[in-house]
């Protein structure tokens, strides 16, 4: 590492102002800060000094996503071989390798397209390159089905980075979660790929042609029951998007983010409370309205993108409220709205994506109301003291 640091220092003058490659200063700076902690410090004003910077925060998020990613690779292969009736004839390695081959190219395309756009925009604006897309680039593949064509991943990623992030000013300025923007783009532009009704398990030599099977939510939408054992739903051995099926894998990521302070437990906890309470109310008072209203509240929490959205999407510090009270309100409304969409809009058995995007829109308003109430309360307190 010392040799690499020495080499970077030796070529750095070429990329600084006046150097022959000064036009690539943003790109060089991005690679340098990715490899090493910047040696520049603030020289004036009052600043909060902390060892946790944006790069470390993003790295924690990426590490928290790894359990869901690894299980998603395994489950992709597991569902493929199970549906073709040859699960007993293959090994753990065969199952994981098949899933790896299906999923890894999606990750590569997501990062290549997204980082290329980020680097290009930084160069044009003359800004530093932020590490925010390192997490977004992992989130986008995990909310996709394993069969999504790579060109669609590229288009959705480009749309999310350009229209969901860069038009607002880049990292920290976006109104909506970029990964969910990518999923929403696919949902409206290519609904057959993102309807939440079915998931494809791919092709393999000497195996039957590709197979599309109904997701647990789609089955519940038709029958009022998932058709899967509850513990299989918790473990994640059910059809679904790559990173959204295993509650245990998602919980491991949640534990890491909560222990490191990267995610807010208030938002996370409130999402589950809002979802559980709303689903329970539908069970008690609306079970005769449709099949989704009959689905047990505990099934609602472990199916689809509910857990994944609650842990990794709703807790996004950029698109969620800053006020502590606002986090409770924001999370509760996301959970409640996700269940309402599932039950009252049976044509779309998911709901978490639209619920989070809707509350992303209202997050600034929630903060504004909370702050306004605090200001009014303090003014009234001053008046009382003055009397």
Image (tube, rainbow, N blue to C red):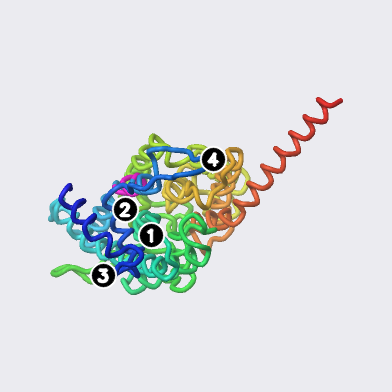
User: What secondary structure is found at the residue carrying circle 1?
Assistant: loop
Predominant secondary structure, magenta span: helix
Q: Secondary structure at mark 2?
A: helix
301 vs 322, left or right, is: left
Q: Earlier in the sequence, mark 1 or mark 3?
A: 1
Residue identified by numbered label 1? 129
Which numbered disc covers residue 210? Answer: 3
Task: Give the alpha-carbon distance from disc 1 to disc 3, as whole Å.
Answer: 41 Å
Please tell me the numbered disc located at residue 270.
4
Residue placed most toward the observer, 172 or 154: 172
1 or 4: tag closer to the N-terminus = 1
Tell me the distance, in whole angstroms, between the alpha carbons under discs 2 and 3. 44 Å
Measure the alpha-carbon separation of dots 4 and 3: 40 Å
- Whether 209 is drawn above or below 59: the answer is below
**Residue that sits furthest to the right in the current view:** 387
* Cα separation between marks 4 and 2: 36 Å
The one nearer the camera, 274 or 65, is 65
Q: CA distance from mark 1 to mark 2?
A: 9 Å
Residue at numbered disc 2: 33
Q: Is residue 240 visible?
A: no
Q: Nearer the viewer, mark 4 or mark 3?
A: 4
Quadrant in the picture for residue 179: bottom left
State the residue lying farthest toward the front.
Answer: 18
Residue segment shown in magenta: 60-66
**Crowd class of label 2 (few under 14; some 14 to 19; many from 20; radius 10 Å):** some
Residue 254 belongs to the span the image colors magenta: no
**Above or below, 254 relative to 195:** above
CB of mark 1 within 8 Å of CB of mark 2? yes
Q: Position of residue 368 (x, y in %)?
A: 67, 48
Task: Pinpoint residue 329: horizontal percent, then vertical percent.
Answer: 60, 43
């Amino acid at each position: 590492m010392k040799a690499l640091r020495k080499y970077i220092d030796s070529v750095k003058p070429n990329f600084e102002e006046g150097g022959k490659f000064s036009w690539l200063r943003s790109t060089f700076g991005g690679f340098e800060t990715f490899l090493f902690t910047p040696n520049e410090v603030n020289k004036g004003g009052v600043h909060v000094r902390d060892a946790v910077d944006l790069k470390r925060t993003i790295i924690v998020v990426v590490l928290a996503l790894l359990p869901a990613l690894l299980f998603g690779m395994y489950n992709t292969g597991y569902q493929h071989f199970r549906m073709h009736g040859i699960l007993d004839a293959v090994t753990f390695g065969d199952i994981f390798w098949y899933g790896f081959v299906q999923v890894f190219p999606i990750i590569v395309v997501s990062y290549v397209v997204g980082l290329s756009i980020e680097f290009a925009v930084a160069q044009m604006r003359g800004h530093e390159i932020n590490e925010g897309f390192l997490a977004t680039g992992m989130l986008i593949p995990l909310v996709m089905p394993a069969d999504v064509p790579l060109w669609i991943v590229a288009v959705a990623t480009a749309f999310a980075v350009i229209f969901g992030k860069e038009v607002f000013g880049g990292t920290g300025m976006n109104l909506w979660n970029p990964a969910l923007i990518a999923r929403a783009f696919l949902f409206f532009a290519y609904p057959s790929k993102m309807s939440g009704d079915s998931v494809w398990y791919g092709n393999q030599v000497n195996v039957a042609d590709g197979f599309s099977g109904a997701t647990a939510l789609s089955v519940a939408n038709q029958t009022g029951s998932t058709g899967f054992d509850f513990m299989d739903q918790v473990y994640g051995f059910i059809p679904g998007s790559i990173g959204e099926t295993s509650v245990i894998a998602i919980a491991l990521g949640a534990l890491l983010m909560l222990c490191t302070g990267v995610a807010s437990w208030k938002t996370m906890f409130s999402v589950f409370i809002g979802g559980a309470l709303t689903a329970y109310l539908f069970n008690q008072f609306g079970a005769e309205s449709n099949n989704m209203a009959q689905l047990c509240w505990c099934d609602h929490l472990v199916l689809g993108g509910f857990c994944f959205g609650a842990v990794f999407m709703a807790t996004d510090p950029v698109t969620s409220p800053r006020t502590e009270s606002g986090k409770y309100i924001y999370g509760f409304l996301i959970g409640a709205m996700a269940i309402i969409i599932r039950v009252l809009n049976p044509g779309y058995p998911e709901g978490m994506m639209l619920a989070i995007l809707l509350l992303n829109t209202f997050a600034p308003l929630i903060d504004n109301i909370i702050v306004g109430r605090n200001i009014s309360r303090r003014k009234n307190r001053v008046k009382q003291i003055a009397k």
